[in-house]
Image: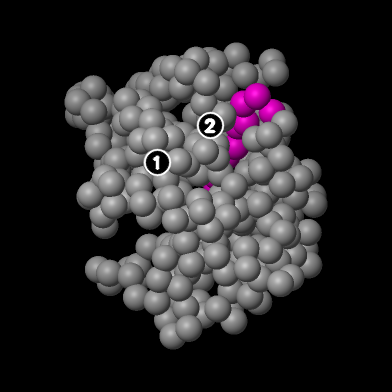
Amino acid sequence: MKISDCYRQQKQTFSFEFFPPKTDDGEKKLFEIVAHLKQLKPSFVSVTYGAMGTTRANTIRIVERIQDEIGIEAAAHLTCVGQSKDEIETVLEELHEKGIENIVALRGDPPKGESEFKPVPNGFRHASELVRFIRKHPKFQDAFSLAVAGYPECHVECRDREKDLQHLKMKVEEGSDVVITQLFFNNRDFFDFVNRCRKTGIRIPIVPGIMPVTHGPQIQRFASMCGAGIPKKIQEAIEKFGDDQPSVEAFGVEYATEQCRELLKNGVPGIHFYTLNKSHATERIYTNLGLCKR
């Protein structure tokens, strides 16, 4: 099932994001986690893509197994990093052959050690170009549902809100089906972002991406990487609990629960959970929201 159909047919859609582990043991554990989370009835899950395509094969294999063996609809991330048009076309062919119908189309981050993104020869500089390539392709133009990223607090490389919004609008106009946002911790940032999107003519579903705080230094690192602000309340909790992981996670689950409760109350089309390959926090948030009964 295409995720575009999920957002058309379901009042609110819930999805989880995972990343390809680096070891066989890590991959085994990931499949155990995904199988366990199946009981929460997610509409789909997504699997990220490594820098320079380093986990491309892992991403495709994991997405295929989740879809075929566990029985959850899955989306594969696809980035422009380190890949020419021909190489991306090869990936599209492989995804299509394996019956994968959903792609999260991203530019991707510069490789480690590089400060700016540089496309390879005959490659793409922007996600909008990747979306256009897929939608204009004679074979794959209708084969995939495409999700793209949105940035409530602007992309870390573009702090001009209007310019950043125009970049998103280009991705939408090229044929995106849904926007999934980067993590954020202040719902006002999300609501303001949606309002600005609607005023500029973006009409497709805009789905909030939520990452519960489960480890202080980790969340600070992620927030810094993606340009998300950390509210004073979270900073104080990180400082207060320090290495007391159970207390940090309990706080993070409660904070994310309240975030989700307000978002759902205000009619968001769904929530996309950044799980960091863990099930406990997501499951507790589901329970707190009463979603396990749906």
Which label is found at residue 155? none
Residue 273 lies left or right of residue 110; in this view the side is right
Disc 2, SS: strand
Nearer to the camera, 198 or 76: 198
Looking at the rendered structure, the kind of residue marked 1 is: Thr
Is residue 67 in view from this perspective? yes
Which residue is label 1 attached to?
Answer: 200
Which residue is label 2 attached to?
Answer: 271
Q: How many numbered marks have been drawn onto this rendered protein structure?
A: 2
Does 155 lie within the magenta span?
A: no
Question: Within the image, what quadrant is residue 37 found in?
Answer: top right
Q: What stretch is highlighted in magenta?
A: 10-18
The residue shown at (33%, 30%) is: 192
Q: Position of residue 122 (x, y in %)?
A: 48, 83
Q: Residues within 10 Å of mark 1 (few under 14, many from 20)?
A: few
Q: Where is residue 118 in the image (x, y as percent from the top left)?
A: 34, 75
The residue shown at (68%, 57%) is: 144
Q: Position of residue 214 (x, y in %)?
A: 39, 33
Q: Distance between the residues labelled 1 and 2?
A: 23 Å
Looking at the rendered structure, the kind of residue marked 2 is: Ile
Nearer to the camera, 25 or 2: 2
> Which mark is first along the chain, 2 or 1?
1
The structure's colour scheme is one colour
Please state which of the two labelled residues, at mark 1 or mark 2, is closer to the viewer: 1
Q: Do the residues labelled 1 and 2 touch (CB within 8 Å)?
A: no
